[in-house]
Image (cartoon, grey):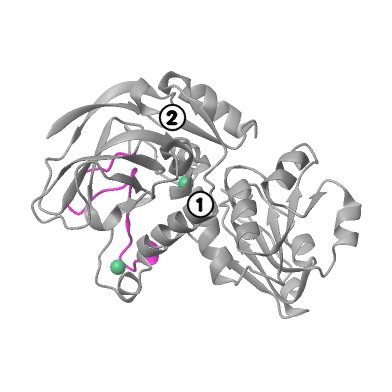
Amino acid sequence: MTTVAAYAAPAAKAPLERTTIERRAVREFDVLIDIRFAGICHSDIHQVHEGWGEAIFPMVPGHEIAGIVSEVGPGVTKFQVGDRVGVGCMVDSCRECDNCKAGLEQYCTGGNVGTYNAVGKDGEPTYGGYAEKIVVDENFVVTIPEGLALDEAAPLLCAGITTYSPLKHWNAGPGKKVAILGMGGLGHMGVKIAHALGAEVTVLSQSLRKQDDGLKLGADHYYATSDEATFKELAGTFDLILSTVSAPLNLDAYLSLLKTDGAFVNVGAPEEPVALNLFSVIGGRKTLAGSGIGGIQETQEMLDFCAEHGFGAEIELIRADEINEAYERVLASDVRYRFVIDTATI
Ligand SMILES: [Zn+2]
Ligand SMILES: [Zn+2]
């Protein structure tokens, strides 16, 4: 066991504070990672606040982890000491079910093991990336390509893959009209990736406050959803709408913006159920779908894609003692576009 410094919420809704946690000794297939940067995801806040149900405390959040390998177990073949690596939202799965075998570990039928706020196969709670080090099985570690700065790469491990996976699955590309709903941590990655895939990209955001950024990141059009005229003008326009919003939405209004056979795909996770008039999908044979992160192989593919196209996330680098303030600012949508913790300040 190794004792490492970390930032943890001691109880639900409590502010995070500096503490120490134990990391397991490196096992045969484990990689010890010196964490350099950890992104702050909105879901960290949902879980600290128990918005998604009962949680495990103390909680060390963080599932957007970038660092350097500092030790490997004797059975490790994928990594060497000194490699630049990342860890995302899961650190294990059953590895035997159809989904795991198909590279869809995120949909493991036995449930994957979350990077934090979960219990590992050894019965111990998992602790995330707001820490100096982490020990992870090599099969749940990915390579961060040269050319991607580690701090800008960290948010790709959740925000990047969460938008990349559905954009690929629903064939965002040349000739397709794609709307990204919400211009936050997930949304800004959705814009960059959809643009790099060759789609015609529209941002649908509450206001035009971030319009300049959206157009700079690759959007072709930018509309305010607070303006009712937007819904009239864009009726029947899109092949795909990717919703990154985690607040309740008027789904019927957004479904009206799809073409026939269009899909509305949700990656934001509201804490409350939402209402829907099913005629909104019957007319136009529309699809209402969801998508969760991506598999390990696809996460590697996404990192390689971002490196090839020369972009990471837009970030604001913060010290560990600014985490609580950063949470307040995320809740106020006051971040452009992802807070990343410099873990050297823990
Ligand atoms: Zn996340
Ligand atoms: Zn499985």
Is 207 left or right of 27, judged from the image as shown? right
Is 253 left or right of 268, judged from the image as shown? right
Q: Residues within 10 Å of mark 1 (few under 14, many from 20)?
A: many
Residue 3 spot, x, y in % from top left:
17, 28
Q: Judging from the image, what secondary structure is the residue with disc 1 in?
A: helix
User: Which one is in front, 66 or 174?
Assistant: 174
| Residue of label 2 | 341
Residue drawn at 75 percent across, 52 percent down: 204
Q: Which residues are magenta?
A: 106-128
User: From the image, which quarter does the N terminus lie in?
Assistant: top left
Query: Mark 1 CB in 8 Å range of ligand 1?
Result: no
User: Does the rendering let one see residue 55?
Assistant: no
Tell whether position 67 is magenta.
no
Residue 59 spot, x, y in % from top left:
34, 34
Name the magenta segment's main secondary structure: loop
User: Does the rendering let one see residue 186?
Assistant: yes
| Residue of label 1 | 160
User: Could you give the CA–CA distance between mark 1 and mark 2, rounded to whole angstroms?
Assistant: 17 Å
Say which quarter of the image contains residue 253: bottom right
Residue drawn at 50 percent across, 28 percent down: 317
